[in-house]
Image: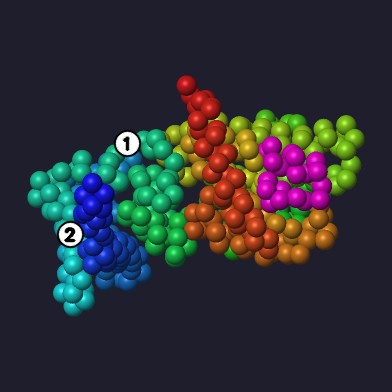
């Protein structure tokens, strides 16, 4: 009996023995396959970027841009078919040839996955050219934009910006990887950007940095006398509690940066509590709500944004309890509001920089402003700028868990 049991166990063990040769072959195939897909996207989007930089390539690519009206409806069927022939078919054919050559030279089976992927682009472009199959061109379907630009996948709102926001940005076609590398995932060129706290140290640094990127700046300030006259900056005074008076001004704004705040340090009086929450939390939320009412029109979801300075106090001590509490409350409500997808909402998670609120900061406001624009142009929705390495680990965990909790236990405002 024991002998039979031992034989059965040995038989089971032999049947369950892992074939490591097969496992390694599968892993190798998957690795090369993923690499080939990534390579295909990089090559395709890089070619697209070159079409906007090289004159003789632009001649053919411009037919693609000339085929669409602002609502992405086509100008004519002939113009649309020409755009498919001179751009989409040409681009996918070049991609297919390059990937095929690479697969033949390297001799890795997984690379043929990228070749197959390139074939899908050529097949779709051929259908659109020969049969006029407009409905297969998902990122160019006509009509109003109903969703905000996605982060990693290119959707209609994301790609619409390439056509009608800034043709020298938003090059990516499926994944936004190349835009993140090149810093073309967001363009502020020609956009009207309003920021509160404009008379503060960071406010002035942000205004200067935005001007360098060819944005039009509207300085919203409760202390207009502290702002020097500056070319390209329009000063609009406002008063705390009267945020509704700014609605007409916000109608014309593309990006609202909420940057004002107060720090009462060690104080915990009733007045300190009220002022901390009123300035740092409630005023910011009122401005957000007012701005969100201006997100109207068929393309507003693609162009309107809110950036909120919630600070590193969301996850780290700031040696000022009321500053931490009020900023954390603001950060949590911003996370909640993001769930509705009314427009892109970015968080600015900033570490200690030298300012009127924090004379002991270790970073300069100019450094922080440059970093904010650097990351925003790469379409980071949570912009972390700090010298504290823990924040880079703690904030994503906090934000993801809070987002999931709110997603499960709250309902959209529209329902």
Between discs 1 and 2, the one toward the N terminus? 2
For the residues carrying marks 1 and 2, which lies nearer the camera in this image? 2
Q: Residue at x 63, y 45 (%)?
A: 308
Does the magenta segment cover residue 322?
Answer: yes
> What secondary structure do most residues of the magenta stretch adopt?
helix
Q: Nearer the viewer, residue 278 or 51?
A: 278
10 Å crowding of disc 2: few (<14), some (14-19), many (20+)? some
Per the rendering, the mark at residue 143 is: 1
Q: Residue at x 32, y 36 (%)?
A: 143
Q: Is residue 48 visible?
A: no
Residue extending furthest toward the left:
130
Q: Secondary structure at mark 2?
A: helix
Is residue 224 left or right of 158 when viewed as pictured?
right
Label annotation for residue 116? 2
User: Which residue is most to the front?
Assistant: 1
Mark 1 falls on what kind of element? loop
User: Which quadrant would residue 280 be assigned to in this image?
Assistant: top right
* Magenta region, residue range: 311-330
Quick check: 7 left or right of 131?
right
* x, y percent for residue 343: 50, 39
Q: Is residue 374 above or below residue 220?
A: below
Query: Which picture quadrant has residue 383?
Result: bottom right
């Amino acid at each position: 009996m024991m002998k039979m049991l031992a034989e059965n166990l040995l038989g089971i063990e032999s049947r369950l023995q892992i074939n490591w040769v097969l496992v390694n072959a599968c892993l190798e195939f998957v690795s090369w396959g993923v690499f080939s897909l990534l390579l295909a996207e990089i090559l395709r989007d890089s070619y697209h970027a070159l079409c906007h930089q090289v004159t003789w390539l632009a001649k053919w690519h411009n037919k693609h841009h000339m085929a669409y009206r602002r609502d992405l409806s086509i100008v004519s069927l002939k113009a649309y078919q020409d755009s498919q022939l001179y751009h989409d078919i040409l681009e996918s054919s070049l991609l297919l040839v390059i990937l095929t050559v690479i697969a033949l030279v390297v001799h890795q089976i997984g690379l043929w996955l990228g070749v197959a992927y390139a074939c899908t682009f050529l097949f779709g472009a051929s259908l659109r050219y020969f049969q006029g199959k407009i409905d297969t061109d998902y990122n160019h379907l006509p009509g109003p934009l109903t969703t905000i630009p996605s982060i990693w996948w290119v959707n209609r709102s994301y790609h619409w910006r390439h056509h009608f926001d800034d043709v020298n940005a938003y090059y990516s076609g499926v994944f936004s990887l190349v835009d993140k590398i090149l810093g073309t995932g967001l363009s502020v060129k020609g956009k009207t950007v309003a920021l509160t706290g404009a008379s503060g140290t960071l406010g002035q640094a942000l205004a200067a940095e935005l001007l360098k990127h060819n944005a039009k700046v509207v300085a919203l300030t409760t202390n207009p006398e502290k702002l020097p006259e500056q070319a390209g900056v329009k000063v609009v005074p406002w008063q705390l509690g009267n945020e509704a008076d700014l609605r007409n001004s916000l109608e014309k704004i593309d990006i609202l940066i909420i940057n004002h705040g107060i720090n009462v340090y060690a104080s915990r009086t009733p007045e300190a509590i009220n002022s901390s929450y009123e300035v740092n939390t409630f005023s910011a939320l009122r401005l957000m709500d007012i701005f969100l009412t201006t997100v109207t029109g068929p393309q507003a979801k693609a162009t309107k944004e809110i950036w909120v300075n919630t600070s590193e106090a969301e996850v780290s001590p700031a040696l000022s309890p009321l500053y931490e509490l009020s900023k954390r409350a603001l950060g949590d409500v911003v996370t909640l509001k993001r769930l509705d997808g009314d427009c892109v909402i970015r968080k600015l998670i900033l570490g200690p920089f030298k300012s009127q609120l924090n004379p002991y900061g270790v970073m300069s406001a100019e450094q922080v402003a440059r970093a904010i624009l650097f990351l925003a142009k790469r379409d980071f929705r949570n912009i972390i700028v700090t010298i504290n390495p823990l924040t880079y680990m703690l904030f994503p965990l906090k934000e993801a868990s809070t987002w999931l909790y709110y997603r499960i236990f709250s309902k959209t405002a529209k329902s």
